[in-house]
Image (cartoon, helix red, strand yellow):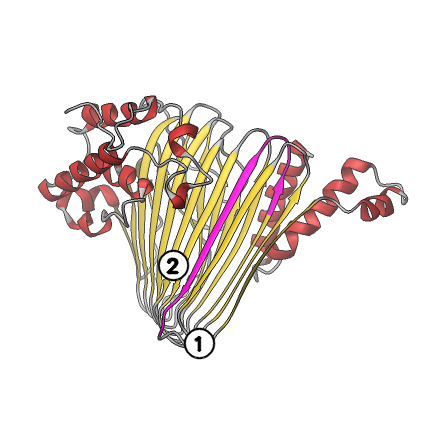
Amino acid sequence: MDVMNVHTGRQPTAAESALVDAFVDRMGELPGDAEVVSARDNAIEALKTQGLPSRRVEAWHYTDLRTLLRGIPDYDSSAGSAALPSVIAGSLVATVSNGTALNAPKIDSVTFTKFSELLANGSAIRHLAIRDGDDAIGQINAAYVTDGWNIIVDDGVELEAPLEIQNAQLRGQGHVRFPVQFGKGVKATVIERQTGGDGEGFSTSVSNLTVADDAEVNWIILREQGANATQLAQLTATLGSNSKLTLYVVNAGGKLVRQEVHVLVKGEGSDFQLRGVNLLAGDTHTDVTMTLGHLVENTTSVQVVRNVVTDRARGVFQGQIKVNRIAQKTDARMACNTLLLSDDGEFDAKPELEIFADDVACGHGATVTEIDGNHLFYLKARGIPENEARGLLIKAFVAEIIEELESEALVEALEAILDKWLSAHI
């Protein structure tokens, strides 16, 4: 295979060359029939032609992947780990370790199939389509994906316990995919748990959700990656009529993280809710980028993102809402609020609205602030040490949206993660 030839004429970076070299080394081991192999070849060719996105690509303006991604670790067959204790006791757990699906629970009317089997028989091909020319995550994942879980939840199922999908990557590389189909009237809570060790790691993860009519789904992305881990992740979802998807994204680790969320509201009466929590410290870089399309009449959405930034960390939130010409009576709102605790920290917010309908209620806003000195003084005057007082104020800022969850056990689990982060960084 030829050396990468970036269309701009630039020399490939070390990371770009390493990605192509890894594909050459592993192409014989990657599962897939002839059609899947062709899709993999097309994905790597697109990556070779375009290179990793730089700040000149609008969607990646605040996350210059070409500069930030300095290298790619080798694959490490010994980087697997056993299943972790579930976030909530009694959860149903499906595990993936080091890019390999290990085991899944037995649930009536719920089907789990290893994604490697879909790759081998060719039925995975519909999941490997690239979104557009800027879809670096889709390109990399389509080229290298080895496994994951394909999950089908039949019509009318109500999961009595949360389903926890564990994806553990201690070091090295891992590339997984999770297509999940929720049938009509389904009620379910799913925790997508992205974890890693302290070794150098590079992983991609793509989740594709289909939420059918009248379904209600809570999906929680919980990220506790290691200090030297890079993860590029993507979630896409389509919503049917009178359905509701509530998505929580909690980032509490990782050296370089990009989490994309792409949602299409296709069914009248449907509702999409996004709540994001970014806890950023050290010299980490975390980017949450969302696109949301309201395509039909009488739909709603609310996105609220809370960020805590300290040390030299940098965060990004890009949120784009598009309202179709026929999507009258749309109610769409977005807010991004940042608590900046360090002069060296940075957070970039880019909310966008594109409205082509004329009977809508839409709005967006972004704020950046520091801890209120009067509030801090009030707590210190009552004998609370400064660090503890700061922690209480930060926790109140974040916990406000965590507490919206109806599950007390889930609220307690997320607050425990917040407490752990605060004790380490505040």
Q: Badge 1: few (under 14), some or many (20 or more) residues near its Cα, within 10 Å?
A: few
Q: Can residue 350 be seen at all in this image of the molecule?
A: yes
Q: Nearer the viewer, residue 35 or 332?
A: 332
Query: In the image, is residue 239 above or below residue 316?
Result: below
Q: Residue at x 86, y 44 (%)?
A: 377
Give the mark nearest the N terminus, 1 or 2: 2
* Disc number placed over residue 358 in the picture, else none: 1
For numbered disc 2, what is the local secondary structure? strand
Query: What's the distance in space between the residues labelled 1 and 2, CA to CA?
Result: 22 Å
Question: Is 41 included in the stretch rendered in magenta?
Answer: no
Residue in the foreground of this view, choosing between 261 and 215: 261
Q: Position of residue 398 (x, y in %)?
A: 64, 50
Foreground label between 1 and 2: 1
Q: Residues within 10 Å of mark 2 (few under 14, many from 20)?
A: many
- Residue 238 position by quadrant: bottom left
Residue extent of the magenta highlight: 307-325
Query: What residue does disc 2 label?
Result: 263
